[in-house]
Structure formats: structure tokens, C-alpha cells
Image: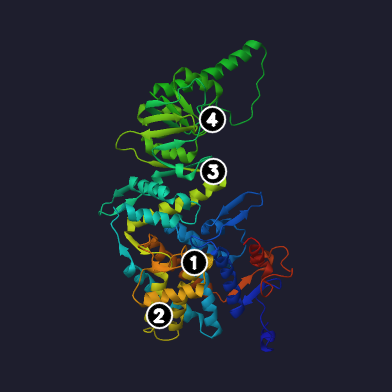
Amino acid sequence: MSQRQRMGQPMIILGEDSQRVKDRDAQSYNIQAARAVAEAVRSTLGPKGMDKMLVSSMGDVTVTNDGVTILQEMDIDNPTAEMIIEVAETQEDEAGDGTTTAVAIAGELLKNAENLLEQDIHPSAIIKGFHMASEQAREEVDDIAERVDTEDEQLLRKVAETSMTGKGAELNKEVLGELIVEAVRAVTVEGPDGENVVDLDFVNIETQTGRSAGESELLSGAVIDKDPTHPDMPSSADEAKALLINEAIEIEETDADASLSLDSPDQLQSFLDKEEEQLKAKVDQIVDTGANVVFCQKGIDDLAQHYLAKEGVLAVRRVKKSDIKFLKEVLGARVVSDLDSATEADLGHGSVTRDDADELFYVEGSGDETHGVTLLLRGSTEHVVDELERGITDALDVVASTVSDGRVVAGGGAIEVEVARRLRDYADSVEGREQLAVEAFADSLELIPRVLAENAGLDSIDTLVDLRAAHEDGQKRAGLNVFSGEVEDTFEAGVVEPAHAKEQALSSATEAANLVLKIDDIIAAGDLSTAGGDEEGGAPGGMGGMGGMGGMGGMGGAM
């Protein structure tokens, strides 16, 4: 080896089947992958955004314009692209909405970063400049944001309606917005420091097809989409004493396979009588607790149903685990795992009524210790109610964020254009090449009003020029009305968004872009290569087999 080193031959570290992309090629590869993800969802942004149809390998169809749903459902097999998807997931977890905005900004940051790289500006300078710009941008958002009275129901409805616009709930957004605000207020309590605390775990969402979305309701308590297990059971209980069970009310099966030898019919009858006694004992245990309603997460034997009906007990079987958990809060009950230990103290109290037309049970708790509300969403078809539920879930999150945070900003691209203008002023105070990165960051923010205009069929350049002029004149709430094509005060027009969602989008997008820019070498071992890695059309530098990194071509077919 020492002789080879003296002869100047290179030391071989990687296996001969390994694949590698370095320096500018690696950066270009990663940026292209990230931008492909961002461009996949750009056309869904805003009230005029288009929907995507996602078809799974099993033939299941999802029609949506919800950014995080699109990215999670798409068959993406690329490590860099998955890093950008994490931006959407983080935005969804932290803010509830703004996923498309966050991903689009991340993609635009990388596009502008690539232009800077071509000017021989080092990635470290770009990363530092983006970080400085992100910190400044969030400060500017806080400065621009309006402090609101969280008791202002009208403003909260505007926040909810803005979030729902373009998401399948638009035609009935006034009705649904009111329901959402009522639901959030129902689960809002005052924290120890006097702040508002919203616990959306106590808001349950149920869907029903066959009726208009405008017929959706907010109900106090829970809604259980089940039927009574026996026709002779009562269908309601005004003073319900409910037992929640996650144990089957059936004959206990042996852990191991067993065989039984019988010599006479009497022995068979004795065996059947024993089983009947076991079921009767289980029902007696339930009755002894004083329960007149049973919600069981698992099965109930036919004979046990008969005994429960004779005792006048309403029983519902195969209730979803999530519904059992919610009923626990609504009724103030405890979930029983073993009937032998069930007591009256485990019971929950309230009322259970049956709606035979909708085939639903309405369960309402009694007492101050019980809480929980249900949004019953209605739509004409499964696809409609699924998209409606996604829009309502986002709207609930943004209203809850607004109630907790107490800050809102004007929508329609107003906040992005104003922050971009202020960042350009800030860039003048930044020394070194980081100044160019700060300016590139400002340019990236203006992608949002440009895309809003494009998706509405408007001229994006003219729109941006008009918006910049309005903000230079001091109209910091000037945004785009995508329906009229005019620049106006979008806050007054009712286009209102939570400031927290904007701050989170800036933070997530910047961190993801910086993470991608920091990579200058991609290495994959030969034994990790996927089949078909040598086929044409792979990633740059023969990266087609690098852990599926050539999968962006497949992703493009799904866009």
C-alpha cells in the first residue's frame, strides 16, 4: 500500500458498485428534486386553486387540493423530496394550515439559491443570509400583525371562512364558519396565566352522505353511527347510566386449540348450558353495576344481546376506539377492560337518543365534569364529505391558533408583499454576500401573490407591480382579490389569516431550504441500489438506483 501511495495512485474507499454525486451536481440534483415537489402543489394555492386526483395502486381515489394530503398520498421515492414533504407535515402539525404556502416558499428559496450558486456565492453565505432573513421576516410579521379580541366572533368567522375558501366548503362557508367558531369556543378554557387554551381533542367530526353541506350541525356531546344490537332493546335513555367496555361480551376462547370428546347428547347439552351460564353471568355483571346503556368496542354474542334486551339495556357493539375515547370525556365514564372489576363508579351519566331517520345515536353528558362537541358534516357523496372534512379540520386548527395566539394578518398575498418590501430595506444594512441572499429571500416571498394571480387566470406580473406600488404607498394590508382581480384592503374584505401560521411557514421553509443547500455530496452503497438503477432516465450522475432517487421521474407522472 505504501508503494502505491508513493506512486500517487488513489486509495479506494468506496466499493466499485457504489454511486456518488458531488459538489455542484449534488446541489443541483437536490434543488431540482425539492422544486419538483413544490411545483406539484403550487396550482392548488388559493381560492381559485385546482384539485388533484390521486389514485392509489388499489384503485382508491382521493380528490383534494389540501397540500399535505397530496404530498402524503403521492408515491414519492426520493430522499430530498421527502425532506420537503416534512415541511408540509410540520406546518400541518404546528399551524394546521398553510402547508402549500410553506412548501411553495421552500421551493422558491431553492430556485433563487441556485441562481446565487451560479454566481459563485458559497452555500454557507446563502444559508446564513436565508437564516438572517427568516428571523427578520418573523419579526416583521409580528410587527404587522393585528392584535385581536378573541371574543370577536365575526373576526374568527372570517378566519375560518378564509381557511375553507377553495376547499370544497366554499359554497356554505358562512354556515360552516359559524359552526367552527362555536365548536372552538365550546372547548376553550382559561389557562393558569389567563391565556386561552383550546383543546381540539374534545371536538369530534362525523360525516354523513346524502344531504347538503349546508345541513351540517354542531351537536353537544357525541354522535355514534351504529344501530342497536337487538330489535327488542330500547332505542333511547333519558337518564342514561352508560358502561364503556373494550372487552367482548362473548364466550371466552381458549388460548390453545382444544378438542372435546362427547359420549352422549346429555354431555353436549351440559356443555351448551355452561356456555349459556357464562354469558348470563356477564350480563348480570353489567346489570349489577346499574348500567342501562352499554357501548362495547368489541363484539356482543347473540345470546348476550337477548339477555341484555330482556333486562331493558340498550347495547351498541363494535364502537370505534376513537368514539369510546370521546364518549369517556362526554359522559365522564371510565373504560372497563374487565367486567369482573366493573362497578357503579365506572358509569358515565347523560342521555342517549336515537335518530331513526339518520340512523344515529346522539349522546349528551350531564354535569359540569363532562365536555365535548361533535361537528356532523354532511355532503352529497363520500368524496365531497372527505374533502369537506379536510377543509373543516384545517379551519378548526387556524381558529384555535387565532384564539390562542391572538394575532391575525391580511391575506391575499398582502403580508408576503409587505414583508418582502421590509426585507429589501433590511438588506441594505447587511454586509457581505449575505445581502444578496436576503434579497433573494424577499423575492421568494412574492411567489405567493404571483401564484394566487396565476391560479385565478390573472397576469402575475401586472398583479405584483400593482401590489408593490400599493405597499410603497403605505397600504400594508393591500392584497389581491382573486375574484375581481383588483388590489384592495383584504383585511377589510374579510380575507384574514393567523399570524402564527405565516411565521411557522417562514421558519419551516427556511430550515428545509438550508438543509438541502448544506448537502454537497450524495453517496449510496451498491447493495442498497434498487432494481433497474442502470436504466436510462435515472438521476444525474447515474443516481437512478440511489435509494430510489430516480423516483422523481415517477413522481412527475402523478402531478
Tag 2: amino acid: Arg
Rounded to the nearest whole Å, what is the CA distance between mark 3 and mark 1? 29 Å
Residue 422: tell me if it is visible: no
- The residue lying at 37 percent from left, 78 percent from top is 472
Residue beneath disc 2? 424
The colour style of the image is rainbow
Q: How many marks?
A: 4
Residue 86: tell me if it is visible: yes
**SS category of the residue bearing label 4:** loop
- The residue lying at 51 percent from left, 80 percent from top is 123
- Picture coordinates of residue 34, whole percent (x, y): 56, 69
Residue beneath disc 1? 452
Rounded to the nearest whole Å, what is the CA distance between mark 1 and mark 4? 52 Å
Q: Which mark is residue 299?
A: 4
Q: Which mark is residue 380?
A: 3
Give the mark, 1 or 2, whose residue is nearer the N terminus.
Answer: 2
Q: Residues within 10 Å of mark 2 (few under 14, many from 20)?
A: some
- Picture coordinates of residue 363, whole percent (x, y): 41, 33
